[in-house]
Amino acid sequence: MPLDFNAIFAEILRSIEPDRGCGKVADYIPALAAIDRMKFGMCVSLENGDTHCVGDAEERFSIQSISKVFTLSMVLRKVGDDLWKRVGREPSGSPFNSIVQLEMERGIPRNPLINAGAIVVTDHLVSDFGPAAMIDELLNRLRMLAGDPSIAVDEDVASSEASVGARNRALANFMQSFGNLHNPVEETLAAYFSHCAISMNCRQLARAALFLAFNGRDPISGKQMVTGEACRRINAVMMSCGHYDNSGDFTYRIGLPGKSGVGGGILVVSPGHGSIAVWSPGLNKAGTSHVGSLALETLVRLTGWSVFV
Amino acid sequence: MPLDFNAIFAEILRSIEPDRGCGKVADYIPALAAIDRMKFGMCVSLENGDTHCVGDAEERFSIQSISKVFTLSMVLRKVGDDLWKRVGREPSGSPFNSIVQLEMERGIPRNPLINAGAIVVTDHLVSDFGPAAMIDELLNRLRMLAGDPSIAVDEDVASSEASVGARNRALANFMQSFGNLHNPVEETLAAYFSHCAISMNCRQLARAALFLAFNGRDPISGKQMVTGEACRRINAVMMSCGHYDNSGDFTYRIGLPGKSGVGGGILVVSPGHGSIAVWSPGLNKAGTSHVGSLALETLVRLTGWSVFV
Amino acid sequence: MPLDFNAIFAEILRSIEPDRGCGKVADYIPALAAIDRMKFGMCVSLENGDTHCVGDAEERFSIQSISKVFTLSMVLRKVGDDLWKRVGREPSGSPFNSIVQLEMERGIPRNPLINAGAIVVTDHLVSDFGPAAMIDELLNRLRMLAGDPSIAVDEDVASSEASVGARNRALANFMQSFGNLHNPVEETLAAYFSHCAISMNCRQLARAALFLAFNGRDPISGKQMVTGEACRRINAVMMSCGHYDNSGDFTYRIGLPGKSGVGGGILVVSPGHGSIAVWSPGLNKAGTSHVGSLALETLVRLTGWSVFV
Amino acid sequence: MPLDFNAIFAEILRSIEPDRGCGKVADYIPALAAIDRMKFGMCVSLENGDTHCVGDAEERFSIQSISKVFTLSMVLRKVGDDLWKRVGREPSGSPFNSIVQLEMERGIPRNPLINAGAIVVTDHLVSDFGPAAMIDELLNRLRMLAGDPSIAVDEDVASSEASVGARNRALANFMQSFGNLHNPVEETLAAYFSHCAISMNCRQLARAALFLAFNGRDPISGKQMVTGEACRRINAVMMSCGHYDNSGDFTYRIGLPGKSGVGGGILVVSPGHGSIAVWSPGLNKAGTSHVGSLALETLVRLTGWSVFV
């Protein structure tokens, strides 16, 4: 019997009601700080092409770190296991973020989903495609998958990120001092800030990630985006490391591979079932959408989609 | 079509052949150091009661840290979410093991599967059952599930552990200094050393953990060992934190919740499919069985049992 | 022209008046928590045998970590530079205290004046003298130097320390796990808790340390307590490491080698001039007497005794 | 009786002979890597204007971090104790250098003599003087004190430093992310690289620092360079923090406030006696001149100039 998403969404809306608007909106750049914290959207994308949406699912937001899942897909397709010479795949496990471990582990970031690791992934892609072509390639893949040629970088957000990016600049320079950045720091960072500043809505995001739920093959277009093995591994890295220092808690509560961004979005994959994007701007202490996590917890309870059942 | 485990085991034996005997056998106590590094056993336990075994699957070994999965089951059944006031559920993510984080996080261990966290779990059980009754209760559960009343603590191993247990004694005293140990240090440690010194073989271990693959209910006896929710969460914690500082790598390569022990055993759960125990004494740098991991990688490839597919 | 200590003490009393009673009295054992925080005593001991005292300089208090200067003197006399194979001589420089570095530096404490390092020194002396004879030897030296055969361990304090000593027990076990403790943990700790529980007053303490101001030779008895070279080095270690994580600040403000204890005492040496003991129980955040430090700052300003002039 | 420096230098040359040429020459920029490791020069500057030199004491070398003593003098004169709001005065005490502590202590460097702290000092001076005028002011002071108008920045070294300065760029960006850098990163870094690239010889260096041995007043020109209090404090900070992670060892062996640079120079102050500069390019593991330290150890033994006697 197919799931009744109308009923599921109704229950989800009830479950998040008391917390709606809670959490802290990212305020380090004006474009993010201005977002209404009451926003909430969610979309489930299925193998047969159906999408089920609720709330502000058509409103675009800054995908931020969720972009790291797509750059990781690109780099694994391109360089394969050589990636792991320059970045690890262990959770960072540290409340103070990653520069401490970067120093102890001599410039090798813990995993490709924390900032330092994602900068290395971007650096790889800049070497392979060139800085501009890399962003074009990424956008083309997202546009093709989501079926919307208007998906683009929000240049205001990108330049705001660049202007306040001292911490990421520190990480990049630090890795360069260990020889783990191969392009000029500012070139790699510009590409990194660009892909984090892509705007998409929940429907597009869920749709674009559907291949991760089906062994690397997009079930709608039939295109094999990454190998089955790479797909399993991307999901594994999302499970271990997708939510900074609350990755363990996310795994515990939701039990699905996912990635959160400080724009309030969370992308989640349920292998064999579908992909889910949720958006709500209020963040918990670790930078994951508070209401988004709650909504996912309810969805998993109602669908039985946890990988641990 | 049912899986052909004869063929699967044949392929596994081929795949591990070049590495057979590799890795470092734990040598901190004589009883472990004496084990033949060529040993290899594996057993798969299924919902219908079938078990498929290969190699030294009937030979008992010291289950060591694998016991932490069973004590975690007991404590979650008993105290529920109150456990998380005294222990976290995030990966430790640190190559130097846990006392560093114990200090920074004021005596709260990162998760219940590292030594410090497992000592807190034991301390909980000592408070609830008493030190001797706690071990009896644990043994009774294991004996019932595995259908073998002879399962027992290896007292030689337990007393060897106690005599060289300075590091665990440091952890326990350290937590006590923060008020996170409620019983006398030596009492809790004695119980901890005892449950780590339980001897079981692969067949028994796989059988005893079968309930974790079926939503907390042992499909053979029909007994609900833990709630479905607790079961999902135990699996989640094993996925995030089951293999010390190579938990991410294990998730990446094998993609199943599991727990390794320095005796060379690994216990793995495939939700909806079954449970697997493997044993081979040579350890990798992070303390997980080297050949055991390889065997599981092949098994997952042949069965398609990864949770990420 | 000799210094006018009456005038100097009058000025010191004025300078500390506004802060009298400030700071937090150590409260981890009842015997320390009960001390009146308004207490203040000071004594200067000079080469010619003169002592100049003010306030509660005749009242005994628990010398605590100040005892580490005397055990360091004993061990350097006995084993010389071999000590530095088991303990470093660098400041620990860390606000979270030493177990973090013990782990990173594999059981070698940073210096002999932090707890872990002082436990190694005690362990050395226990090996050389035996646990009881070591305390006798230490007391005999203090009694001889201070001219008071009644100096003794406060057994109430020692047993209280032992009963709440989980943190030190963690440190000792941790070092033992790295092979850097040669006697049974409890034996070495008992000796350590004993020497920290010695009671002395300011007059006795200043007098007992006078040899450190005169190249290792006690100018009153004429006895060479340690070699000139050892004396310079003890002073150097006190300067670098005498006050936990505010050693740099103490050097900056007072500019003399010294050692503080959580009983509120501070012992300070002015090479070529004399030795000073001050006592006031209220501690600053780093565990150094707040009013005692202020008094020393004034004394150094009035006498010009800083080593940096 | 005045010291016989001819005899002292002869003994020093004998004492260093077996180690001459040992240690590792800094090789991160060509200008430093090219220096002959057999070089050795030393100069002692006295209150009466006498200077005693031996070896390559007239050959200029890159003073590198020794410049931090002079920028610290300038900033204390200018801003006084307000400096300590932006930088600490505790030893860093860590073998992995400072970015770890920068993160834990939220962008406040441990002390003004490690790179991060010296960059904050430079940033202060850039705010006060402007970037170019700051270097002019520093050079004018050094030229006046050393009596040589040709003292200058080696522009080759400065631009080499800038081109390989990823680590310092990481530190500066990291502090900026915490709001502890007030000028554009590249502007402050350019000034920092410039002052580290000043070339001086031992005679000039000893002469320029003579005021630190005489309470802040240069005894030759009669000029009060810093207050007596600031002078004591600069010496205290050099004693606690002058030699990275072997500051404690330097204090233990030599017992004088000093500062080393990776160019192989060491500047040392003996309050009331004089100032000493030594140069020999081979460095120990912590970045301090190996032969230079040996020479100072002998000098202190022969002169009795340790502050701990």
Image (spheres, coloured by chain):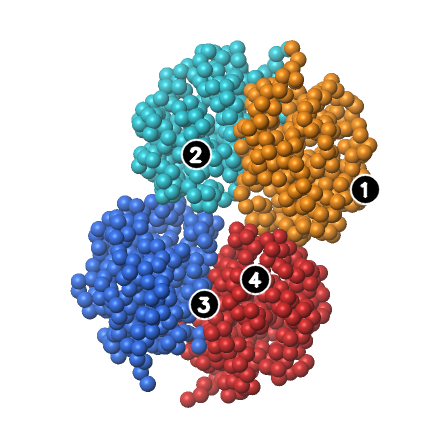
Chain colours: A blue, B red, C orange, D cyan
Kindly identify which residue carries mark 2. Answer: D85
Q: Foreground mark, 3 or 1?
A: 3
Q: Nearer the viewer, residue A257 or D221?
A: A257
In the rendered structure, which amino acid carries the disc numbered 1? Ala
Subunit under mark 3 = A
- Image quarter of residue B208: bottom right
Distance CA(mark 2)–CA(mark 3): 42 Å
Q: Residue at image x 59%, y 58%?
A: B180
User: In the structure shown, which secondary structural element does the residue marked by tag 1 occupy?
Assistant: helix
Q: Position of residue C185 (x, y in %)?
A: 71, 51
Q: Residue at image x 59%, y 62%?
A: B120
Kindly identify which residue carries mark 1. Answer: C133
Q: Is residue B158 rendered to the left or right of residue D203?
A: right
Distance CA(mark 4)–CA(mark 3): 16 Å
Kindly identify which residue carries mark 3. Answer: A252
In the rendered structure, which amino acid carries the disc numbered 2? Lys
Q: Position of residue B244 (x, y in %)?
A: 52, 62
Subunit under mark 4 = B
Which quadrant would the C terminus of chain A be assigned to in this image? bottom left
Q: Foreground mark, 4 or 2?
A: 2
Badge 1: residue crowd in 10 Å (few <14, some 14–19, many ≥20) = some
Q: Foreground mark, 2 or 1?
A: 2
Q: Is residue B93 above or below residue C258?
A: below
Kindly identify which residue carries mark 4. Answer: B117
Q: Position of residue C162 (x, y in %)?
A: 71, 49
